[in-house]
Amino acid sequence: MGELLAGVVVAAAALILILEPIVRRPGRFRVARKAEDADFEAMLAPLEESESPKVQALLALKEIEFDRATGKLSDDDYRQLRASYSAMAMQAIKAEDAADAKADAVAVVAAEAVEDSAEALVARMRKTLAICPQCGPRPETGATFCSNCGRTLTA
């Protein structure tokens, strides 16, 4: 009898879990959706406050697309605004790409300078390292004898 009662309880719990999303209140789903929309709006807020010409032109293009879709803009106005904002966006994108290319060129020159100084340091260290005829270059600077085999070091 106890097993039958336990089986009925498990079946009822499973039925509740399965039917719960179907019979839940519609308001709960809408609240979750509004929270997602709020998160999306919060993510867009920094973009809208950006003073980057590229971001501003792209946001303006998005806005005129919305205005056209809602019937606030005529087709002629839409074409004129789209052409001007597209030109502004392309100009801003090209300017940003040029600035990025300039920054990359500066980074390459700096990396080459670091590499050259590293090569100079390695060459200087090779000149100062003592060399054992049997063990090879030794890390000891200023030593007369090899710390490994005891032979006389050559410069």
Image: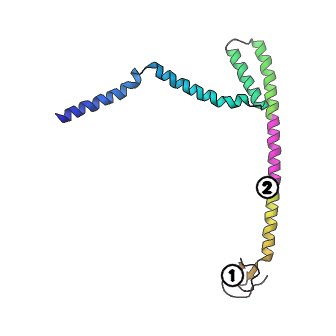
Which dot marks residue 135? 1
Badge 1: how crowded within 10 Å, few (<14), some, or many (20+)? few
Write the start and end of the magenta stretch as one range.
94-109
Image coords of residue 129 (percent x, y): 76, 77
Residue at image location 75% in from the left, 23% down from the top: 60
User: At label 2, which amino acid type do we have?
Assistant: Ala
| Mark identifier at residue 110 | none
Q: Quadrant of residue 126?
A: bottom right
Task: Report the Cα–Cα distance between label 2 and label 1.
Answer: 34 Å
Name the residue rendered at 70%, 16% in the picture: 67
Identity of the residue drawn at 59% across and 29% down: 39
* In this view, the mark in front (2 or 1): 2
Earlier-in-chain disc, 2 versus 1: 2
Lateral position of residue 93 relative to residue 149, left or right: right
Whether 130 is drawn above or below 20: the answer is below
Give coordinates of residue 75: x percent, y percent.
75, 13
Can you give x and y, in whole percent of width and height, for residue 58 in the image? 74, 27
Q: Is residue 93 magenta?
A: no
Residue 111 - label: 2
Specify the quadrant of the image occupied by residue 13: top left
The relative height of residue 43 versus residue 118 in the rendered view (above or below) is: above
Q: Secondary structure at mark 1?
A: loop
Question: In the image, residue 143 lies at what x, y percent?
Answer: 74, 83
Foreground: 28 or 93? 28
Q: Quadrant of the N terminus?
A: top left
Q: Element at badge 2?
A: helix
